[in-house]
Image (cartoon, grey):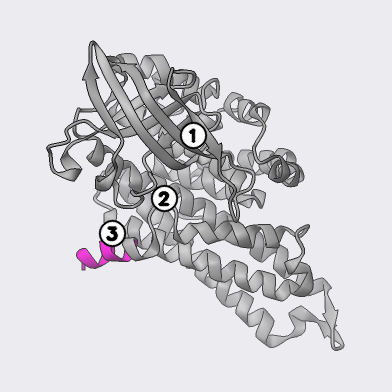
Amino acid sequence: MRSIYVDDDLEAIRLSVREFVERELVPNVEQWEEEKSVPRSVLDAMGKLGFFGLRVPEEYGGLGLGHISTVVFAEELGRCTAGGTSITVLVHTDLATPYVTNFGTGPQKERWLPAFASGELITAIGVTEPDAGSDVAALRTTARRDDKGWRLNGTKMFITNGGFADVVFIAARTSPEAKGSRGISIFAVEKGTEGFGASRALSKMGWHSSNTAELVLDEVWVPADHLIGEENQGFYHVMHNFQNERLSIMSAALGECQKALDLTIGYVKERHAFGSSLWGKQAIRQRLAMRQAEVDAGRELVYKAAWMLDQGQEAVREISEVKALIGELSNRVLYDCVQFHGGMGYISETAVERMYRDVRINSIGGGATEVMLEEVAKRL
Protein backbone atom coordinates (compact mmCIF):
# COMPACT_ATOMS: atom_id res chain seq x y z
CA MET A 1 0.00 0.00 0.00
CA ARG A 2 1.73 3.16 -1.22
CA SER A 3 1.53 6.14 1.14
CA ILE A 4 0.27 9.49 -0.12
CA TYR A 5 3.49 10.97 1.30
CA VAL A 6 5.72 8.98 -1.10
CA ASP A 7 6.53 10.45 -4.52
CA ASP A 8 7.96 8.64 -7.53
CA ASP A 9 11.58 9.33 -6.55
CA LEU A 10 11.07 7.86 -3.09
CA GLU A 11 9.23 4.90 -4.58
CA ALA A 12 12.23 4.25 -6.84
CA ILE A 13 14.47 4.28 -3.75
CA ARG A 14 12.11 1.84 -2.06
CA LEU A 15 12.29 -0.60 -4.95
CA SER A 16 16.08 -0.32 -5.09
CA VAL A 17 16.40 -1.03 -1.36
CA ARG A 18 13.90 -3.90 -1.54
CA GLU A 19 15.84 -5.52 -4.39
CA PHE A 20 19.09 -5.25 -2.44
CA VAL A 21 17.47 -6.61 0.74
CA GLU A 22 16.01 -9.63 -1.04
CA ARG A 23 19.18 -10.35 -3.00
CA GLU A 24 21.96 -9.58 -0.53
CA LEU A 25 20.51 -9.67 2.97
CA VAL A 26 17.67 -12.20 3.31
CA PRO A 27 19.70 -15.20 2.03
CA ASN A 28 22.57 -14.47 4.44
CA VAL A 29 21.07 -13.27 7.72
CA GLU A 30 21.15 -16.71 9.35
CA GLN A 31 24.90 -16.89 8.84
CA TRP A 32 25.37 -13.38 10.23
CA GLU A 33 23.25 -14.31 13.23
CA GLU A 34 25.72 -17.09 13.98
CA GLU A 35 28.70 -14.83 13.40
CA LYS A 36 27.16 -12.12 15.64
CA SER A 37 27.85 -9.37 13.11
CA VAL A 38 27.15 -8.06 9.63
CA PRO A 39 30.21 -8.22 7.33
CA ARG A 40 31.86 -4.90 6.62
CA SER A 41 31.74 -5.77 2.91
CA VAL A 42 27.94 -5.58 3.03
CA LEU A 43 28.06 -2.15 4.65
CA ASP A 44 30.59 -1.04 2.03
CA ALA A 45 28.23 -2.17 -0.73
CA MET A 46 25.31 -0.26 0.78
CA GLY A 47 27.44 2.85 1.05
CA LYS A 48 28.52 2.61 -2.58
CA LEU A 49 24.88 2.32 -3.65
CA GLY A 50 24.10 5.59 -1.88
CA PHE A 51 21.87 4.15 0.84
CA PHE A 52 23.91 5.76 3.62
CA GLY A 53 23.67 9.24 2.16
CA LEU A 54 19.92 9.72 1.82
CA ARG A 55 19.86 12.40 4.53
CA VAL A 56 23.41 13.72 4.08
CA PRO A 57 23.50 17.13 2.31
CA GLU A 58 24.43 17.02 -1.36
CA GLU A 59 27.59 19.09 -0.88
CA TYR A 60 28.97 16.29 1.31
CA GLY A 61 28.17 13.42 -1.04
CA GLY A 62 24.57 12.64 -0.09
CA LEU A 63 21.12 13.20 -1.55
CA GLY A 64 19.89 15.74 0.99
CA LEU A 65 16.47 14.13 1.42
CA GLY A 66 14.10 14.44 4.37
CA HIS A 67 12.67 12.25 7.10
CA ILE A 68 10.27 10.47 4.75
CA SER A 69 13.26 8.95 2.98
CA THR A 70 14.30 7.49 6.33
CA VAL A 71 10.90 5.83 6.69
CA VAL A 72 11.05 4.38 3.18
CA PHE A 73 14.60 3.09 3.66
CA ALA A 74 14.09 1.69 7.16
CA GLU A 75 10.77 0.05 6.33
CA GLU A 76 12.34 -1.89 3.49
CA LEU A 77 15.39 -2.72 5.58
CA GLY A 78 13.09 -4.16 8.25
CA ARG A 79 11.92 -6.76 5.74
CA CYS A 80 15.29 -8.53 5.85
CA THR A 81 13.90 -10.75 8.71
CA ALA A 82 16.79 -9.97 11.09
CA GLY A 83 16.46 -6.97 13.37
CA GLY A 84 20.15 -7.15 14.20
CA THR A 85 21.05 -6.54 10.57
CA SER A 86 18.61 -3.64 10.28
CA ILE A 87 19.82 -1.90 13.42
CA THR A 88 23.47 -2.22 12.40
CA VAL A 89 22.68 -0.02 9.41
CA LEU A 90 20.21 2.35 11.06
CA VAL A 91 22.51 3.16 13.97
CA HIS A 92 24.97 4.46 11.39
CA THR A 93 22.55 6.28 9.11
CA ASP A 94 19.96 7.65 11.52
CA LEU A 95 21.14 7.39 15.12
CA ALA A 96 24.75 8.59 14.84
CA THR A 97 25.47 10.40 11.58
CA PRO A 98 22.80 13.09 12.22
CA TYR A 99 24.87 14.47 15.11
CA VAL A 100 27.33 15.82 12.55
CA THR A 101 24.68 16.66 9.95
CA ASN A 102 22.61 18.67 12.43
CA PHE A 103 25.15 20.05 14.89
CA GLY A 104 28.59 19.75 13.31
CA THR A 105 30.77 22.67 12.24
CA GLY A 106 31.71 23.22 8.61
CA PRO A 107 35.13 21.58 9.04
CA GLN A 108 33.57 18.64 10.92
CA LYS A 109 31.07 18.07 8.12
CA GLU A 110 33.81 18.24 5.50
CA ARG A 111 35.96 15.82 7.48
CA TRP A 112 33.38 13.16 8.30
CA LEU A 113 30.16 13.34 6.29
CA PRO A 114 31.54 12.21 2.90
CA ALA A 115 33.08 9.15 4.58
CA PHE A 116 29.86 8.47 6.50
CA ALA A 117 27.80 8.70 3.30
CA SER A 118 30.13 6.37 1.36
CA GLY A 119 30.43 3.82 4.16
CA GLU A 120 34.17 4.35 4.45
CA LEU A 121 33.57 5.18 8.11
CA ILE A 122 30.85 3.51 10.22
CA THR A 123 29.45 5.21 13.29
CA ALA A 124 27.81 4.51 16.64
CA ILE A 125 26.25 6.57 19.42
CA GLY A 126 27.33 6.18 23.05
CA VAL A 127 24.68 7.61 25.38
CA THR A 128 23.35 4.67 27.43
CA GLU A 129 25.19 3.67 30.61
CA PRO A 130 24.67 0.95 33.22
CA ASP A 131 22.64 3.42 35.33
CA ALA A 132 21.36 5.78 32.62
CA GLY A 133 19.13 4.63 29.78
CA SER A 134 16.04 6.69 28.98
CA ASP A 135 17.11 9.00 31.83
CA VAL A 136 19.89 10.66 29.83
CA ALA A 137 20.36 13.41 32.43
CA ALA A 138 21.62 10.78 34.88
CA LEU A 139 24.69 9.75 32.87
CA ARG A 140 28.03 9.71 34.72
CA THR A 141 30.69 9.66 32.01
CA THR A 142 32.80 12.80 32.45
CA ALA A 143 34.80 15.09 30.20
CA ARG A 144 37.23 17.59 31.70
CA ARG A 145 39.32 20.17 29.90
CA ASP A 146 42.92 19.09 29.32
CA ASP A 147 45.39 21.25 27.41
CA LYS A 148 43.81 21.88 23.98
CA GLY A 149 41.19 19.18 24.32
CA TRP A 150 39.14 17.04 26.66
CA ARG A 151 39.81 14.00 28.81
CA LEU A 152 36.94 11.47 28.92
CA ASN A 153 36.28 8.80 31.56
CA GLY A 154 33.37 6.44 31.96
CA THR A 155 31.50 3.39 30.70
CA LYS A 156 28.83 3.03 28.02
CA MET A 157 26.49 0.05 27.85
CA PHE A 158 24.41 -1.64 25.10
CA ILE A 159 26.22 0.21 22.31
CA THR A 160 25.22 -1.12 18.90
CA ASN A 161 28.20 -1.14 16.48
CA GLY A 162 30.37 -0.31 19.50
CA GLY A 163 32.85 -3.09 18.85
CA PHE A 164 33.77 -2.02 15.31
CA ALA A 165 32.59 1.56 14.70
CA ASP A 166 35.19 3.96 13.34
CA VAL A 167 33.65 6.97 15.10
CA VAL A 168 31.51 6.90 18.25
CA PHE A 169 29.63 9.94 19.46
CA ILE A 170 30.00 9.92 23.25
CA ALA A 171 27.75 11.87 25.61
CA ALA A 172 29.69 13.06 28.66
CA ARG A 173 29.19 15.43 31.56
CA THR A 174 31.24 18.59 31.01
CA SER A 175 29.79 20.67 33.84
CA PRO A 176 29.43 18.54 37.01
CA GLU A 177 27.99 21.43 39.00
CA ALA A 178 25.19 22.09 36.50
CA LYS A 179 21.72 20.58 36.68
CA GLY A 180 21.70 17.13 35.08
CA SER A 181 20.33 18.13 31.69
CA ARG A 182 22.42 21.31 31.39
CA GLY A 183 25.95 19.99 31.74
CA ILE A 184 26.27 17.35 29.00
CA SER A 185 28.23 17.56 25.74
CA ILE A 186 28.79 15.28 22.73
CA PHE A 187 32.26 14.23 21.56
CA ALA A 188 33.44 12.33 18.50
CA VAL A 189 35.83 9.59 19.61
CA GLU A 190 37.69 7.74 16.87
CA LYS A 191 38.53 4.05 16.87
CA GLY A 192 42.06 3.41 18.08
CA THR A 193 42.19 6.40 20.41
CA GLU A 194 44.32 5.50 23.43
CA GLY A 195 42.23 4.38 26.41
CA PHE A 196 39.09 3.79 24.33
CA GLY A 197 37.67 0.42 23.36
CA ALA A 198 35.12 -2.33 23.83
CA SER A 199 35.60 -4.22 27.09
CA ARG A 200 33.24 -7.02 26.07
CA ALA A 201 30.63 -8.04 23.52
CA LEU A 202 27.16 -8.50 24.95
CA SER A 203 25.04 -11.60 24.32
CA LYS A 204 21.39 -10.76 23.68
CA MET A 205 17.96 -12.36 23.48
CA GLY A 206 17.59 -11.12 19.90
CA TRP A 207 19.38 -8.93 17.36
CA HIS A 208 22.10 -11.58 17.22
CA SER A 209 23.61 -10.22 14.00
CA SER A 210 24.28 -6.83 15.58
CA ASN A 211 27.52 -6.13 17.40
CA THR A 212 26.57 -4.82 20.85
CA ALA A 213 29.33 -3.82 23.24
CA GLU A 214 30.23 -2.26 26.53
CA LEU A 215 32.62 0.63 25.92
CA VAL A 216 35.21 1.89 28.36
CA LEU A 217 36.83 5.32 28.31
CA ASP A 218 39.93 5.52 30.48
CA GLU A 219 41.57 8.94 30.36
CA VAL A 220 40.66 9.22 26.67
CA TRP A 221 41.96 12.48 25.19
CA VAL A 222 40.18 14.10 22.26
CA PRO A 223 41.06 17.45 20.66
CA ALA A 224 38.81 20.45 21.14
CA ASP A 225 37.51 20.24 17.58
CA HIS A 226 35.91 16.86 18.39
CA LEU A 227 33.21 18.59 20.45
CA ILE A 228 29.97 18.19 18.47
CA GLY A 229 27.54 21.06 18.83
CA GLU A 230 27.58 23.48 21.73
CA GLU A 231 29.29 22.74 25.03
CA ASN A 232 26.79 21.76 27.76
CA GLN A 233 23.99 21.47 25.17
CA GLY A 234 24.48 17.76 24.48
CA PHE A 235 21.33 16.72 26.35
CA TYR A 236 19.24 18.83 24.00
CA HIS A 237 21.11 17.50 20.98
CA VAL A 238 20.30 13.95 22.16
CA MET A 239 16.65 14.82 22.73
CA HIS A 240 16.46 16.33 19.25
CA ASN A 241 17.90 13.24 17.60
CA PHE A 242 15.74 10.90 19.68
CA GLN A 243 12.86 11.89 17.38
CA ASN A 244 14.83 10.73 14.36
CA GLU A 245 16.00 7.59 16.17
CA ARG A 246 12.51 6.55 17.21
CA LEU A 247 11.10 7.23 13.78
CA SER A 248 13.71 5.10 12.01
CA ILE A 249 13.54 2.16 14.41
CA MET A 250 9.76 2.03 14.28
CA SER A 251 9.82 2.31 10.49
CA ALA A 252 11.97 -0.82 10.47
CA ALA A 253 9.49 -2.40 12.89
CA LEU A 254 6.73 -1.75 10.37
CA GLY A 255 8.77 -3.57 7.75
CA GLU A 256 9.23 -6.47 10.17
CA CYS A 257 5.50 -6.61 10.80
CA GLN A 258 4.62 -6.58 7.12
CA LYS A 259 7.18 -9.24 6.24
CA ALA A 260 5.99 -11.46 9.10
CA LEU A 261 2.37 -11.10 8.01
CA ASP A 262 3.30 -11.90 4.40
CA LEU A 263 5.17 -15.02 5.48
CA THR A 264 2.36 -16.13 7.79
CA ILE A 265 -0.44 -15.58 5.30
CA GLY A 266 1.51 -17.60 2.76
CA TYR A 267 2.07 -20.36 5.31
CA VAL A 268 -1.53 -20.68 6.54
CA LYS A 269 -2.83 -20.80 2.98
CA GLU A 270 -0.64 -23.86 2.32
CA ARG A 271 -0.85 -25.60 5.71
CA HIS A 272 -3.81 -27.96 6.05
CA ALA A 273 -5.44 -29.23 9.24
CA PHE A 274 -8.85 -30.73 9.98
CA GLY A 275 -9.81 -30.94 6.34
CA SER A 276 -8.93 -27.45 5.09
CA SER A 277 -6.17 -24.89 5.00
CA LEU A 278 -5.56 -22.83 8.12
CA TRP A 279 -6.58 -19.81 6.07
CA GLY A 280 -9.98 -21.47 5.81
CA LYS A 281 -10.39 -21.07 9.58
CA GLN A 282 -12.33 -17.88 10.17
CA ALA A 283 -10.66 -17.10 13.49
CA ILE A 284 -7.19 -17.24 11.93
CA ARG A 285 -7.84 -15.21 8.78
CA GLN A 286 -9.79 -12.57 10.70
CA ARG A 287 -7.02 -12.21 13.30
CA LEU A 288 -4.47 -11.74 10.54
CA ALA A 289 -6.78 -9.29 8.77
CA MET A 290 -7.02 -7.22 11.96
CA ARG A 291 -3.26 -7.21 12.40
CA GLN A 292 -2.88 -6.05 8.80
CA ALA A 293 -5.36 -3.25 9.42
CA GLU A 294 -3.38 -2.18 12.50
CA VAL A 295 -0.11 -2.21 10.55
CA ASP A 296 -1.67 -0.16 7.75
CA ALA A 297 -2.97 2.39 10.27
CA GLY A 298 0.39 2.51 12.06
CA ARG A 299 2.17 3.08 8.76
CA GLU A 300 0.12 6.19 8.06
CA LEU A 301 0.90 7.57 11.52
CA VAL A 302 4.61 7.01 10.89
CA TYR A 303 4.53 8.77 7.52
CA LYS A 304 2.47 11.64 8.94
CA ALA A 305 5.02 12.15 11.73
CA ALA A 306 7.88 12.12 9.20
CA TRP A 307 6.02 14.63 7.03
CA MET A 308 5.53 16.92 10.04
CA LEU A 309 9.26 16.87 10.74
CA ASP A 310 10.00 17.65 7.11
CA GLN A 311 7.64 20.63 7.35
CA GLY A 312 9.53 21.92 10.39
CA GLN A 313 6.61 21.22 12.70
CA GLU A 314 6.76 20.10 16.33
CA ALA A 315 6.17 16.34 16.36
CA VAL A 316 7.27 15.07 19.79
CA ARG A 317 3.78 13.86 20.62
CA GLU A 318 3.35 12.11 17.27
CA ILE A 319 6.78 10.47 17.40
CA SER A 320 6.14 9.33 20.97
CA GLU A 321 2.82 7.85 19.84
CA VAL A 322 4.62 6.09 16.99
CA LYS A 323 7.21 4.62 19.34
CA ALA A 324 4.62 3.39 21.85
CA LEU A 325 2.10 2.14 19.30
CA ILE A 326 4.39 0.39 16.82
CA GLY A 327 6.66 -0.97 19.55
CA GLU A 328 3.74 -2.77 21.15
CA LEU A 329 2.05 -3.66 17.86
CA SER A 330 5.14 -5.41 16.49
CA ASN A 331 5.14 -7.68 19.53
CA ARG A 332 1.46 -8.55 19.01
CA VAL A 333 1.94 -9.18 15.30
CA LEU A 334 4.88 -11.53 15.79
CA TYR A 335 3.12 -13.33 18.65
CA ASP A 336 0.27 -14.20 16.30
CA CYS A 337 2.59 -15.08 13.44
CA VAL A 338 4.47 -17.57 15.61
CA GLN A 339 1.17 -18.93 16.93
CA PHE A 340 -0.22 -19.56 13.46
CA HIS A 341 2.99 -21.23 12.33
CA GLY A 342 2.35 -23.73 15.11
CA GLY A 343 5.31 -25.93 16.02
CA MET A 344 7.30 -24.60 13.07
CA GLY A 345 7.07 -21.13 14.57
CA TYR A 346 9.06 -22.38 17.55
CA ILE A 347 11.88 -23.84 15.45
CA SER A 348 14.97 -21.67 15.16
CA GLU A 349 15.30 -22.20 11.41
CA THR A 350 12.02 -20.34 10.89
CA ALA A 351 12.21 -16.63 10.12
CA VAL A 352 9.26 -15.76 12.36
CA GLU A 353 10.99 -17.34 15.36
CA ARG A 354 13.97 -15.05 14.89
CA MET A 355 11.75 -12.05 14.26
CA TYR A 356 9.70 -12.84 17.37
CA ARG A 357 12.85 -12.56 19.51
CA ASP A 358 14.04 -9.49 17.66
CA VAL A 359 10.89 -7.40 18.01
CA ARG A 360 10.87 -7.67 21.80
CA ILE A 361 13.36 -4.80 21.95
CA ASN A 362 11.00 -2.51 20.02
CA SER A 363 9.06 -1.58 23.15
CA ILE A 364 12.29 -1.06 25.14
CA GLY A 365 15.14 0.37 23.08
CA GLY A 366 15.09 4.01 22.07
CA GLY A 367 12.58 4.85 24.79
CA ALA A 368 10.44 2.34 26.66
CA THR A 369 6.69 2.34 26.00
CA GLU A 370 6.00 3.70 29.47
CA VAL A 371 8.35 6.65 28.92
CA MET A 372 6.78 7.37 25.54
CA LEU A 373 3.26 7.35 26.95
CA GLU A 374 4.31 9.88 29.56
CA GLU A 375 5.58 12.12 26.76
CA VAL A 376 2.20 11.82 25.09
CA ALA A 377 0.33 12.41 28.34
CA LYS A 378 2.25 15.64 28.97
CA ARG A 379 0.88 16.99 25.74
CA LEU A 380 -2.76 15.98 26.16
Label 3 crowd (10 A; few <14 / some 14-19 / many >=20): many
Q: Is residue 235 visible?
A: yes
Residue that carries the numbered disc 1 in the rendered image: 92
Q: What whole-number distance in Å separates the C-alpha atoms at marks 1 and 3?
A: 25 Å
In terms of depth relative to the viewer, which is nearer, 6 or 345?
345
| Residue annotated with mark 2 | 247
**Foreground: disc 1 or disc 3:** 1
Report helix, strand or loop for mark 3: helix
Check residue 255 in the rendering and tell me which mark sits there, or answer none: none
Quadrant of the rendered image containing residue 374: bottom left
Up-down relation of residue 139 to residue 258 (above or below): above
Q: Residues within 10 Å of mark 1 (few under 14, many from 20)?
A: many
Q: Quadrant of the C terminus?
A: bottom left
Residue 108 position within the rendered picture, expressed as x and y whole percent measured from the top left: 34, 17
The foreground one among 27 and 350 is: 350
Question: Which residue carries the number 3 mark?
Answer: 317
Query: Between residues 342 and 36, which one lies in front from this camera angle?
Result: 36
